[in-house]
Image (cartoon, rainbow, N blue to C red):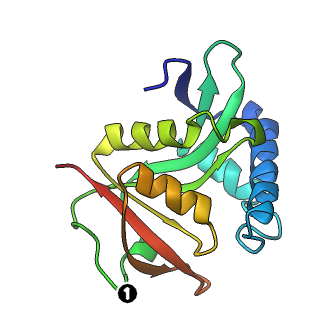
Amino acid sequence: MNDSLFIRKAIPADLPDILRIYEEARGYMRTQGNPTQWANGYPAENLIREDIAADRCHLCVDTPSGEILGVFCFFIGDEPTYRRIDGGSWCNDAPCGIIHRIAVGADAHRRGVASFCFAYAFAMCGNVKIDTHRDNLPMQHALEKNGFVRCGMIYLENGDERIAFQKCGK
C-alpha cells in the first residue's frame, strides 16, 4: 500500500480539481488511441455534483501536499446496466461495490494512484465490478494487473458496449 496516499469523500469545494482531473484524463485517453470514450465533456458537472451529494465521489489525495491525484465514483449496491452481461458471466451475484468514472491526474499515472483506488474499493467490499471502453487499453491493463478478471460485455443506457470486469474475494 502507498503510505503517501489516502482516500476521502469529495465535497463541493473540490469541484474545480475534479473537473481538471477529468479534463486531463480525456486528453490522456485521446493520446492513447481512445478518442471517443468520455467525449463531449463526460462526465458532466451535474453528474459529478450528484455523485458528491450522494457521497459516491471519492478522491485519492497525496498526504504530504494535499493534492488531489485521482477521482472515482464508488458505491455498494445495484448497477442496472450490469444486470445483462453477454459473452460471459459475472464471477458471482453477491452484493458488490461498483466503480465508475475513475480518473487520474496527468502527473499521477505512474504513481500507483489507480491501484490505490482499486485496493480501497476492494477493502470496502471484497467484491467489486467495473467496466471500461474497448479502446481503453491502459485501464484494461490496470484492472488485470490489480486482479480484476474480464467477465463479458455490458451495455450502457444508450446502448454503447463496455467490457465488464470483476474482482472477487477468495
Q: In the drawing, does residue 101 fall left or right of residue 121?
A: right
Q: Quick check: 5 above or below 131?
A: above
Residue 130: give x, y in percent of width and height.
Answer: 45, 61
Amino acid type at image mark 1: Asp
- Count every numbered label the image shows and give the total: 1
At horizontal 74% and vertical 61% (from top left) the residue drawn is 29
Give the residue at x 64% y 38%: 110
Tell me the quarter of the image containing the N terminus: top left
Q: Residue 107 occupies which quadrant of the picture?
A: top right
34 to the left or right of 132: right
Residue 8 in which image quadrant: top right
Residue at the left extreme, as displayed: 170
Specify few, some or many for label 1: CA neighbours under 10 Å numbering under 14, 14-19, or 20 or more. Answer: some
Residue matched to label 1: 86
Q: Is 65 in front, or is 115? A: 115
Q: Quadrant of residue 5?
A: top right
Provide the secondary structure element on which disc 1 rests.
loop
Residue 78 visible in the snapshot: no
Q: Say which of 156 and 169 sits in front.
A: 169
Left or right: residue 28 versus residue 3 is right
In the rendered view, tell whether residue 97 sits above or below residue 33. Answer: above
Residue 158: x and y, percent?
A: 62, 84
Q: Nearer the viewer, residue 157 or 72?
A: 72
Q: Residue at x 61, y 33 (%)?
A: 111
